Amino acid sequence: MAHQNHGSQMLTANRLRDGDVLYRKGDGWVLALADGDVFGDEAAAQAALAAAQGEAGRNEFVSPYLFEVRIVDGRIIPVKEREVIRAAGPTVRHDLGKQAGMVNV
Amino acid sequence: MSEIQPNMYRYDEFDARFVAERTAQFAGQVQRRLSGELTEDQFKPLRLMNGLYLQLHAYMLRVAVPYGTLSSRQMRMLAHIARKYDKGYGHFTTRQNIQYNWPRLVDVPDILRDLARVEMHAIQTSGNCIRNVTADHFAGASADEIEDPRPLAEIIRQWSSLHPEFVFLPRKFKIAVSGSPHDRAALAFHDMAIEIVKNAEGRTGYKVLVGGGMGRTPYIAQALGEFVEKQDILAFLESVLRVYNEQGRRDNIYKARIKILTNALGIEELKKLVAREFAEIKARGDLTVPREELDRITAYFAPPAFETLEDAMPFFDEKKGGDAAFNAWASQNIAKHRAPGYAIATISLKAVGAVPGDASAEQLDAIAGIMDRFSLGEVRVSHEQNLVLPHVRQRDLPAIFAALQAIDLATPNAGLITDIIACPGLDYCDLANARSIPIAQRIARKFADLDRQHDIGELKIKISGCINACGHHHAGHIGILGVDKKGVEFYQLQLGGSGAEDASIGEVMGPGFTEHEIAGAVERVVNAYLAARKPGERFLDAYRRIGMTPFKQAAYDMEAA
C-alpha cells in the first residue's frame, strides 16, 4: 500500500489462521500495538513492508500494510480512527478484542 | 418442549449432497491455504464464495438465511456456533442473514459442517454472484398478502445456486420478493425485485423490477415486466441476467451494477434486449417452470393447520386496563395475521443502548424455545434487523411477552424512532469510514422515552458507515452516512428516503456533523417535524409536504436545544 506521508509509521497484518491483528516487531510479529516497531522514516517503513511481503510464503500472516502513528506522552497513537479501533477492539463492546485481553488463539 | 419442524423447504438429496460436497471442498481449500499450497491471492476469492471475509479484528462469516426463514433447530445451531466458535453472539444483517465476527479460519470447516447438519450454509453470501434471496418477513402470515412469496424465492434460490452462467457476474446481484402490496422487503432498492400481483382477470403473476440499488449511486428500480406468467419467471430472470452479464461494465467496480446499465441503456432499450433473450429462451422451452414443480415447492410452505379461533386481542381495548408494559409492546410490535385469533409478533433487537441486530447465544437459544412453544417452530429475520414470530395465537401474547422480557428482548419499539438500522460500521467492518453503532445508540438514548417515541410515530432512521450503504441510509426517513474527513468521523444527514411501497431516495442536507453533534441534529430535525406536522402526518409525509428548508435550518441551529 503506497503511503504519501513521511511521519512515523507501523506495519500491521492479520494472522492467517485466526485473523488476529499483528504488528511488526523486528523480524516477527506481536499482538499488541504498544509492543510493535515504530518506523521514523519512510525508507525504514518501506523496507519493513518489503521484508514482510517477501515472507508471504511462510503462510503466517496476510495483507501487510503501513499506517501512520504519532507518539503522545510516550504512547503510540494511530492517526486514523480505524487503526485505533483495530488495535483495541469494537468501541461498543469493551469486553471484546485486544482491549479485553482477547487473543484469537 | 419438543422441537417443531415448521412448514418450510427441506433439503432433498441433491441439496444435501451439494452442500456436503461444497463444505468438503472448502475444508480442503482451507487446508491447502494453511499448508501454503494456495496463496492468499488464490484463496481470497474461494473464501469469499463461502461467505468468509477478513474484517478489522478477525475473519467474519456470513451465513445465509434463505428469505429470512429459520426453524428452531437452525436457531439452536446458530446459538451453538456463537458459543463454540465465536464470542457468544451473532449479528443479524439488513439482508436477513447472520454474521459471526470472530471465527478462526481453522474452525470454519467445522462451522460449515455444523451448519450443513441443519440445512444451512454460507454459499453466495459474498462475491459477484446472485446473492441470498430476500423476502417479506411477514410472508405467509400477513393479512394483506396476495400469495406467499417464499415458494418463488426457493425456486430462484435453486435456479441461482451455482448457476454456471452467473457465477462471475460483473458485480453482486441482489433479488427480493414480496407477495403483498405493502412493501416490507425494500423491493425498489434491489438489482431485481419481484412483486406478486393479480392481473385484470384475477390471475396471479409477477411484476419484475430492475435497476434499483443503494451505494454510491442510488436508484429506484423500474418496471421491466408488468405481468410475467408464473411458468415463465425463470426464463425472464435468466434473460435479464444474460443481458447484464454480457453488457454490464467490468472495467469500473463503481459502475458495474445493473442499476448503472439500466440507466445507461434506458429502461425501454433494456426491455427490448431482455425481450429478445426471453423469446430465444422460451423457444428453447427448457426453462419453463412445470406446474407440478411449482406445486411441489409450494407444498413445503403450506399454511400451518391454524386452530379455529376468534380475534380476541385483549390489548385492543386499552380501557380494560391490564399490564401497561404488555399493552405498550402489543400495540407496537404486533401485526395483523391472516388467520383469526393469530398475530405476527416482532422481536425487537433494538433495545435502547444495544447494538442493532445483535443477539447473544443465550437469547438465540431462548428464542428457539419460544418458537417451539408459541410460533410453530418458526422465526423470520427482517431486513430491519429484527426477528419475527410469524404465527402466534393472540391468547399467547402475554406469555410470549413475559418470555421475551426474561431475555431483554421485549422492547416495544417496532417501527419507531429507536428501531434503527445500523451497519456494523468502523467498529467491525474493513470497508467502513466511520462508526455506525455508537451513533444509533446515542440517538436511541436521546429518544428513549416511550411516550415521546409514540408521539413522534413512525420514523425510520438508517445509518451506514460508508457509501456502500449496508445500513440503507438512502432509504431512511432520516438517513445518516458516516464519512472520513482526514481521519475524523463525520456524519451527513439525508431526509425523505423510504424503502416501502412509496420508495424514494433521501436528499442530502448539507455539511456533516461530528459524532458528538449528530444526535442533537437529529433531535432538532425531529422537533422541527413535531412543530410543523398536521394531524396524523408522519415525518416522511411532513418532509414531502414542506421540503428540506425548515429541517435544514433546525439541524444547523446548534444553539437550539
Image (tube, grey):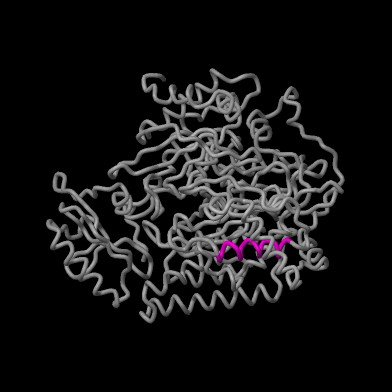
Per the rendered image, the range of residues in magenta is B233-246
Q: Residue at x 55, y 72 (%)?
A: B113
Q: Nearer the viewer, residue B479 or A36?
A: B479
Q: Residue at x 44, y 43 (%)?
A: B437
Main secondary structure type of the part rendered in magenta: helix
Whether residue B5 is visible? no
Q: Quadrant of residue A56?
A: bottom left
Q: Position of residue B90 (x, y in %)?
A: 51, 54
Q: Position of residue B342 (x, y in %)?
A: 78, 43
Reply above or below: B347 against B458: below
Q: Residue at x 55, y 56 (%)?
A: B258
Q: Is residue A74 left or right of residue B520?
A: left
Q: Is residue B519 left or right of residue B23?
A: left
- The C terminus of chain B is located in which quarter? top left
Q: Is residue B256 left or right of residue A65?
A: right
Q: Nearer the viewer, residue B10 or B256?
A: B256
Q: Quadrant of residue B553?
A: top left
Q: Is residue B467 left or right of residue B367?
A: left
Q: Is residue B183 magenta?
A: no
Whether residue B557 is visible? yes
- The N terminus of chain B is located in which quarter? bottom right
Q: Position of residue B362 (x, y in %)?
A: 55, 53
Q: Position of residue B144 (x, y in %)?
A: 76, 42
Query: How many dots with numbers?
Result: 0
Q: Is residue B239 magenta?
A: yes
Q: Nearer the viewer, residue B27 or B245?
A: B245
